[in-house]
Image (tube, rainbow, N blue to C red):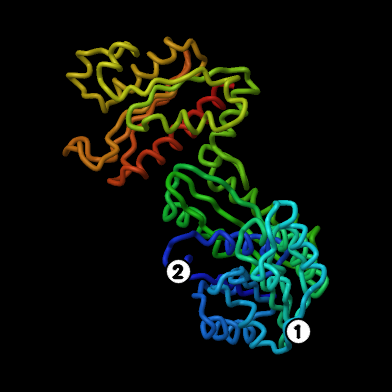
Amino acid sequence: MNADIITIGDEILIGQIVDTNSAFIGSELTKIGVNIRQILSISDNESAIINALDQSIIKSDIVIITGGLGPTNDDISKTTLLKYFGGKLIIHDESLKFIKSFFAMRGKELTERNYKQAEIPDSCKVLLNKSGTAPGMVFEKNNTLIFSLPGMPFEMKELFINDVIPYIKEKYKLPFRLHKTILTEGIPESTMADLLKNWEDNLPEEIKLAYLPSPGILRLRISISGNNKKYLNIKLNDEIDTVVNLIGNNHIYGFDFDTLEQKVGNILLEQKSTLSIAESCTGGKISSLITSIPGSSQYFKGSVVAYNNKIKTDLLNVSLSDLKNFGAVSQQIVEQMARGIKELMKTDFAVATTGISGPGGGSTDKPVGTIWICVLTDEKVMTKKFLFGENRERNIIRASFSALNLLRNLIIASL
């Protein structure tokens, strides 16, 4: 089954708001085995809506439209759909009853504009909106289902989950589609593609691999579709095992919705171990990631953002002579920072970062993007130099994730 998603609104086209509706709809349809053919964003314009419908109905089994159902003059979806599918406007009594109670509960007067929102074309089936005042509508043409939903995300999501998904499942016999996402750190997309090339070239037709890169993290989504769910589960798990063996556990930190900060926190919690962090170039980003996890106070004692060299020497006992001889961005200094914060906070594990995030401050010997990371315990030290690039924001993110994964590997090695 193929589906098109059409979002209506000039505010999307000019970048005034971000289209989160399409991402949600695409994700939910994919879960039930529907293939997304295309996503269109169009203006609040009758001809644009009609042209989009003409194209989509020919090529797709399902069309999801969001937006343009409000009470203002630029909300023209309903009148355009009436013109396109025919019929006349009638009052939908159940929607009107809900709209009246909606305003009464808020102590507001029901206006003529709001009253008219209960008007719907008699050529559609109505989806009662229990979170707002604009009903959803379902049309059918040439064996294609067309859903028109409000653009407000919380209204759309409730209608989509409670009404649209069951409607589609009842109408069509859908295949099973299963996904598993492998989460990796430290391997660039091109390197990963080379590593997996032979495996990927020999995949059966029903299995697809998608590379989903972001700064510091590369997600590998493996999908399989078919009619025998038991077979699909076995086959998918076999392929996951193959990929894990090819990549290795040093770079794989989890699956699906895991996060590095969560995985690190879980291990520390299980081992009843504690952590402290000394950050220079990452500016507190690692600490922010760690403390984003509820309950992190059980294993995270604290951090120092030692951006100034005097803080490094005064708080972390970094050697002033080593700063002069080797510079702040060096193996010697990052290891002293890690030892200093571990001693200061009295923790089992410590992390330290120092580097040149950019865009300025680089040199021939130490270009922008040079980052040193150290993780250590009393018995083990892991120190690594990275050359990330010239973008400051990406350097900070990549350094933070690299530090967390280095820490994860150290903790595992210490077990």
Residue 95 spot, x, y in % from top left: 77, 67
- Amino acid type for the residue under numbered disc 1: Ser
Determine whether the residue tagged by mark 1 lies in a helix, strand or loop: loop
Can the viewer see residue 180 in this picture? yes
Determine whether the residue tagged by mark 2 lies in a helix, strand or loop: helix
- Quadrant of the drawing holding the N terminus: bottom right
- Amino acid type for the residue under numbered disc 2: Leu
- Quadrant of the drawing holding the C terminus: top right
- Residue drawn 79% across and 60% down? 229
Residue placed under numbered mark 1 in the picture:
123
Q: Residue furthest front?
A: 109
Front-lying residue, 43 or 119? 119
- Residue 150, compared with residue 318, is above or below; it is below
Label 2 and label 1: CA atoms lie apart by: 30 Å
Label 2 with label 1: CB-CB less than 8 Å: no
Q: Is residue 91 left or right of residue 288?
A: right
- Residue drawn 41% across and 29% down? 284
- Residue drawn 42% across and 55% down? 190
**Quadrant in which residue 374 is drawn:** top left
Front-lying residue, 297 or 46? 46
Residue 24 spot, x, y in % from top left: 62, 59
Residue placed under numbered mark 2 in the picture:
13
- Residue 121, compared with residue 101, is above or below; it is below
Circle 2: is it few (<14), some (14-19), or many (20+) Cα within 10 Å?
some
